[in-house]
Image: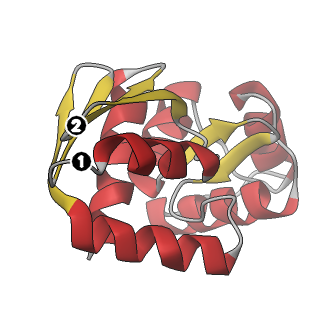
Amino acid sequence: MEMTTTRSERRQRLLELVERNEIQNQQQLQELLQAEGVSATQATISRDMQDLGISKGPRGYVRVDEPAMEPEGLQQLKERLREDVEAVDRAGTMVVVRTTFGVARPLAREIESAKLPQLVGAIGGDDVIFLATRSASQASELKRLLKRLRG
């Protein structure tokens, strides 16, 4: 049974489905939405996912602002980002993090250990970190996340 839903209702259902299920592709998500009476095109779902900060991780879609990291490690990363990061910018599919001198390499390892779903890999120099992602949208998500964690 299909019912008319508002954009906010559709997005709320989308978030609930992602939180409750291991969803591997947008077609599966579209089918789950339809089973709940919500009709949406793949383009609409894709746009909603980007706006809501949902990205594909190793176990399916996850909300990006909830990194797969234990709270203690997350708190330590937040402190390091606040103390050592001077700027965060996006360049294509990369995120460039400017740090105080001498901390980029260990901070890059710490960011990699956070297992953020958008991150493919990191390279740290003396005062700059290059974070590689698979797409420009994932780079934007990662930039937003790092800035939010940084405070």
Quadrant location of the C terminus? Answer: bottom left
Is 75 placed above or below 142 here? below
Q: Which amino acid does label 1 sit on?
A: Gly
Q: Residue 102 carries which label?
A: 1
Q: Residue 37 vs residue 144: left or right?
A: right
Which of marks 2 and 1 precedes in the sequence? 1
Crowd tier of the residue under label 1, counting other residues whose Cα lies within 10 Å: few below 14, some 14–19, many 20 or above:
some
Image coordinates for residue 70, horizontal then vertical, percent = 71, 71
- Colouring scheme applied when the structure was drawn: secondary structure
Secondary structure under tag 1 reads loop
* Residue ID at (73%, 66%): 16
Task: Tell me the residue that label 2 is attached to.
Answer: 126
* Residue ID at (59%, 65%): 66
Q: Do the residues bearing badges 1 and 2 touch, measured as CB atoms within 8 Å?
A: yes
Image coordinates for residue 143, horizontal then vertical, percent = 30, 47
Crowd tier of the residue under label 2, counting other residues whose Cα lies within 10 Å: few below 14, some 14–19, many 20 or above:
some
Is 27 placed above or below 20 here? above
Residue 105: tell me if it is visible: yes
Is 58 placed above or below 9 here? above
Secondary structure under tag 2 reads loop
Residue nearer the viewer, 6 or 27? 27
Residue 5: tell me if it is visible: no
**In whole angstroms, how far apart are the C-alphas of marks 1 and 2?**
5 Å
